[in-house]
């Protein structure tokens, strides 16, 4: 996640830097490979169960293939403006859909009884909290520079503050 | 269904009351030891015992232990949900009633990323808005894929802990 923070200052669709997009691709690949390892450990613990092996193996394969695609995509950001980043979304969407589909089909991957809804609502709350902080910051800035709305030309300190 | 042998504590429950208190004491000591022992490298996400019907909501297996001691074996009454058929050969995982602390910590990383991104880029035109949407959906889908794993299989182990930064670079692990 810190890797994402490294990227964000230079992440721009209109002025693409190939290095930034390559880093993003490699980070996504790392994530998927780690997830494949994770599912591998689960497969190891479920090795005694007949009905658990196939879906977990499919999940490992899915994550591994996605990681390899991200790696290959990383090499294709040569420079200039491309729309290649949209492939990220295609792959990710396929991943999510396949994961959900597998969880419907097999009991091992089922979400029944898990706290998925509480996870999503918690994230929403945290994001709303961050957004409220930004809104309050904007209000404070407006109040601090109240004169700049009514006077023309605006006073110097009003322009400098922002 | 290959049923693993029950733990030793359950074997030592004898009809005499002295034995029973001994067993309870042993159980509580075992649970304390399990709670305060060193963090293992890898922990199984399966419910200990693996018996269908003992559905636990607590985060640690220690909290299910007294219930297993006192509750009757529900398997003797048959299976209500699938027409009396014995369960399929499917493992039972630990279920968490609420988000664990490590997951919430990961959510904070997500929020911090978003805040940093909106700090460095002021959204003033359509291209920047598109950039923001792309960035947000990338990290959100990443979070979602990880969350789908976490809600099912997360464990309290060393291998489970650095998962906070498993989507990021290895340098975040320090």
Image (spheres, coloured by chain):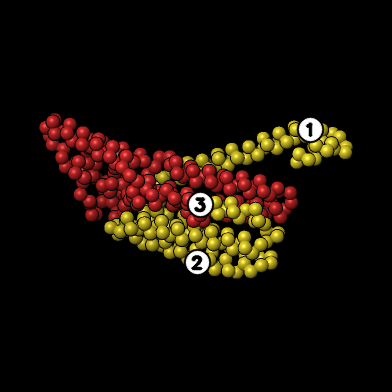
Chain under disc 3: B
Task: Spot the residue most to the left.
Answer: B16
> What residue is pinned by disc 2?
A68
User: Which chain letter matches label 2?
Assistant: A
Say left or right for A36 vs A136. Answer: left
| Label whose residue precedes the other's in the sequence (2 or 1) | 2
Same chain for marks 2 and 1?
yes
Q: Residue furthest front?
A: B174
The number of callouts visible is 3
Residue ID for mark 1: A146
Crowding around mark 3 (Cα neighbors within 10 Å: few <14, some 14 to 19, many 20+) is some
Q: Which residue is mark 3?
A: B172
* Disc 2 from disc 1: Cα separation: 54 Å
**Within 10 angstroms of label 1, few (less than 14), some, or many (20 or more) residues?**
few
Chain B colour as displayed: red
Q: Say whether residue B61 is visible.
A: no
Which quadrant of the structure image shows residue A74?
bottom right
- Chain hosting mark 1: A
Left or right, residue B54 beside residue A18: left
Q: Are marks 1 and 3 in contact (CB under 8 Å)?
A: no
- Counting from the top left corner in percent of width and height, residue B117 is at 63, 49
Residues under numbered marks 2 and 3 in contact, where contact means CB atoms less than 8 Å apart:
no
Share a chain, discs 1 and 3?
Answer: no
Please determine if labels 2 and 3 lie on a single subunit: no
Q: CA distance from mark 1 to mark 3?
A: 42 Å
Residue B39 located left or right of residue B99? left
Which residue is at the front of the view, B43 or B141?
B43
Q: Secondary structure at mark 2?
A: helix
Q: Colour of chain A?
A: yellow
């Amino acid at each position: 996640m810190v890797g994402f923070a490294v990227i964000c200052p230079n992440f721009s669709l209109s002025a693409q830097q190939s290095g930034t997009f390559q880093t993003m691709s490699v980070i996504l690949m790392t994530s998927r490979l780690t997830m494949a390892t994770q599912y591998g450990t689960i497969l190891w613990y479920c090795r005694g169960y007949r009905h658990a092996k196939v879906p977990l193996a499919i999940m490992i394969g899915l994550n591994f293939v996605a990681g390899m695609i991200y790696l290959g995509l990383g090499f294709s950001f040569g420079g200039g403006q491309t729309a290649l980043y949209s492939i990220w979304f295609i792959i990710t969407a396929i991943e999510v859909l396949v994961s959900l589909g597998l969880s419907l089909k097999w009991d091992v991957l089922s979400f029944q009884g898990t706290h998925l809804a509480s996870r999503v609502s918690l994230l929403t709350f945290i994001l709303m909290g961050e957004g409220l902080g930004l809104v309050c910051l904007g209000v404070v800035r407006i109040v601090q520079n109240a004169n700049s709305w009514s006077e023309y030309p605006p006073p110097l300190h009003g322009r400098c503050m922002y | 269904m290959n049923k693993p042998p029950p733990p030793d504590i359950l074997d030592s429950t004898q009809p005499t009351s002295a034995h029973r208190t001994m067993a309870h004491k042993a159980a509580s000591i075992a649970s304390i030891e399990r709670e305060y022992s060193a963090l293992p490298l890898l922990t199984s996400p399966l419910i200990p015992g693996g018996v269908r019907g003992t559905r636990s909501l607590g985060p640690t297996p220690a909290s299910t232990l007294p219930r297993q001691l006192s509750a009757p074996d529900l398997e003797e009454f048959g299976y209500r949900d699938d027409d009396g058929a014995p369960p399929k050969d499917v493992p039972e995982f630990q279920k968490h009633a609420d988000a664990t602390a490590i997951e919430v910590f990961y959510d904070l990383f997500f929020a911090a990323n978003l805040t940093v991104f909106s700090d460095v880029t002021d959204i003033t035109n359509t291209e920047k808005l598109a950039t923001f949407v792309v960035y947000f959906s990338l990290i959100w889908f990443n979070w979602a894929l990880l969350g789908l794993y976490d809600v099912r299989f997360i464990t309290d182990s060393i291998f489970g802990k650095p998962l906070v930064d498993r989507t990021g670079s290895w340098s975040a692990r320090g």
